[in-house]
């Protein structure tokens, strides 16, 4: 398998048959897929991450900057403009990923990153300055990619640690699925309990929306074990229809109003199917304004924090997707790695330039891979659906999280199966792998899991007198992660 070869207009399959058109360009037959599978996979990926068009405006639109202003308009912010720009950037960059890198990976505004921008960065400066920092972060990562540094770090990571990253992400997205469905809930601080999460709102399941999730999970498992083609897509569509009926009968509303309501989208048919897009946030950034607002040191530290999270999130995500799709080579490296990283870096800058925060690779792409996606055609389909959703945004809101996230739970299981590739008798790799796997779901962060695993790997080599066997780049990365974990006391000390 060639790691750097670009898609061609024609290619030769394993049987010697020449192919052309879509098949040849995307190497569909060569990767053991079909156009039908790619289209289904692209649709499923869109359904499992379409929530970002609704959720990103809710995160960015209500936060205020240092001047007390919201993003894109009056209080609250211009939610319609944020939604339109979110869908636009996700669509364009996901299509670019498919065409340039030929990899079944979709991109959109990064969750966690958008919250950091909204509540930790914008509170110190104007929204334009904050988005300028995001653009800078994307450009810095792009330079690291073009100079080969980002890819060199990826190659320096031991193969079994890459496997642990995939397994940890599997557990992480399964937890995301359970939380987004309301099956697992955060315990309110006022409860003074010793555990951070629990079953349902009060230690037990309540409300019909969670029943809809359970039906969806049972359905996708049933279809999957019976090897039904289109199992994930069928389950999402069928469960959405059930959700619409349930809401029409019970009128449960949003979970913001009731603990037994729908987690995000309320599955009701909208009054308007088509909405006129508003792109008011595009170009709403000031590239260097943050340096004047908070000073050079503080601005550099904020860029560093954004960069490190973006840097390793994508590394973990593309490895996990490649492993699930069976596209990794013997060293655990996906095809067209350089191209994947370039597009991802451009997406980070594009998100800032559009005023919707850094765009990054989405692990929900694994749901499309689970449906059979193996090439960039699936990404093109997902991207086109994002572009369509700009004007058909009301239709996107029909699909509740409870109908989409059973796919994440199933894909979490599929990714968990890779755990057998780790030598659990070798403590030098087993302990770092363990920390990588468990800390991703336990901290709700891919970056934290990767950082803990890297630091543990280096520590163990040092205490066993094997420091010379640590790749030089891993020393650099370990040092960066020390700064990452200690960023708040460092910032306070420098301030």
Image: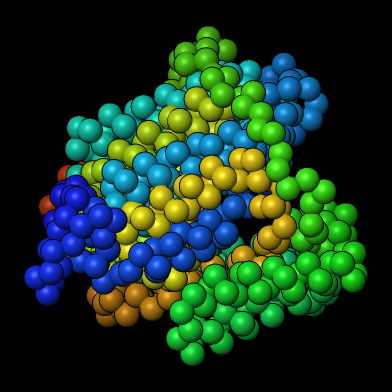
Determine the residue positioned at 62% across, 27% down.
279
Q: Quadrant of residue 29?
A: bottom left
Q: In terms of depth relative to the viewer, which is nearer, 81 or 10?
A: 10
Relative to 218, residue 198 above or below:
above
Q: In terms of depth relative to the viewer, which is nearer, 197 or 68?
A: 68
Q: In terms of depth relative to the viewer, which is nearer, 480 or 290?
A: 290
Q: Is residue 376 visible?
A: yes
Q: In terms of depth relative to the viewer, which is nearer, 67 or 371?
A: 371
Determine the residue positioned at 81% across, 71% down.
245
Q: How is the image coloured?
A: rainbow
Q: Quadrant of the N terminus?
A: bottom left
Q: Position of residue 479 (x, y in %)?
A: 32, 41
Q: Quadrant of residue 262?
A: bottom right
Q: Residue furthest top?
A: 292
Q: Position of residue 261 (x, y in %)?
A: 83, 63
Determine the residue positioned at 57% across, 19% down.
284
Q: Position of residue 28 (x, y in %)?
A: 27, 63
Q: Quadrant of the C terminus?
A: top right
Q: Residue furthest right?
A: 250
Q: How many marks?
A: 0
> Is residue 489 left or right of 452 when viewed as pictured?
right
> Is residue 208 left or right of 331 when viewed as pictured?
right
Q: Is residue 183 visible?
A: no
Q: Residue furthest left?
A: 16
Q: Residue furthest bottom?
A: 226
Determine the residue positioned at 52% across, 15% down.
286
Q: Position of residue 477 (x, y in %)?
A: 30, 43
């Amino acid at each position: 398998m060639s790691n750097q070869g670009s898609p061609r207009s024609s290619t030769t399959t394993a049987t010697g048959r020449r192919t052309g058109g879509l098949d040849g360009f995307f190497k569909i037959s060569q990767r053991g897929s079909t156009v039908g599978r790619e289209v289904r996979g692209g649709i499923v990926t869109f359904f499992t991450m379409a929530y970002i068009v609704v959720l990103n405006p809710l995160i960015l639109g209500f936060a205020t900057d240092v001047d007390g202003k919201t993003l894109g308009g009056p209080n609250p912010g211009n939610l319609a403009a944020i939604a339109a720009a979110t869908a636009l950037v996700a669509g364009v960059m996901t299509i670019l990923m498919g065409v340039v890198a030929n990899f079944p990976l979709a991109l959109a505004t990064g969750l966690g990153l958008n919250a950091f921008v909204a509540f930790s960065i914008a509170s110190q400066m104007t929204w334009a300055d904050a988005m300028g920092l995001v653009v800078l972060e994307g450009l810095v990562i792009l330079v690291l990619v073009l100079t080969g540094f980002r890819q060199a770090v990826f190659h320096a990571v031991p193969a079994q640690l890459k496997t642990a990253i995939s397994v940890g992400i599997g557990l992480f997205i399964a937890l995301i699925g359970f939380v987004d469905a309301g099956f697992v809930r955060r315990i309110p601080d006022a409860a003074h309990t010793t555990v951070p999460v629990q079953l349902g709102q009060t230690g037990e399941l309540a409300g019909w929306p969670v029943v809809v999730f359970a039906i969806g999970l049972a359905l996708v498992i049933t279809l999957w074990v019976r090897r039904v083609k289109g199992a994930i897509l069928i389950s999402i569509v069928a469960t959405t229809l059930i959700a619409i009926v349930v809401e029409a009968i019970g009128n449960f509303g949003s979970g913001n109003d009731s603990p037994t309501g729908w987690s995000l989208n309320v599955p009701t048919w909208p009054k308007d199917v088509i909405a006129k897009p508003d792109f008011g946030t595009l170009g709403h950034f000031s590239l260097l304004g943050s340096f004047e607002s908070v000073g050079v040191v503080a601005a550099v530290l904020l860029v560093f924090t954004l960069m490190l999270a973006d840097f390793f999130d994508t590394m973990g995500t593309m490895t996990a997707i490649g492993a699930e799709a069976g596209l990794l080579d013997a060293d655990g490296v996906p095809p067209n790695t350089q191209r994947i990283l370039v597009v991802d870096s451009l997406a980070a800058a594009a998100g800032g330039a559009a005023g919707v925060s850094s765009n990054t690779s989405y692990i929900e792409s694994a749901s499309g891979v689970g449906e059979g996606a193996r090439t960039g055609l699936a990404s093109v389909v997902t991207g086109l659906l994002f572009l369509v959703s700009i004007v058909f945004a009301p239709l996107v809101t029909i699909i509740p999280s409870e109908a989409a996230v059973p796919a994440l739970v199933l894909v979490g299981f599929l990714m968990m199966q890779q755990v057998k590739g780790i030598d659990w008798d070798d403590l030098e790799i087993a302990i770092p792998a363990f920390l990588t796997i468990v800390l991703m779901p336990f901290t709700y962060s891919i970056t934290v899991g990767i950082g803990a695993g890297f630091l543990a790997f280096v520590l163990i080599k040092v205490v066993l007198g094997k420091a010379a066997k640590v790749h030089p780049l891993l020393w650099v990365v370990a040092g960066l992660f020390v700064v990452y974990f200690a960023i708040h006391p460092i910032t306070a000390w420098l301030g």
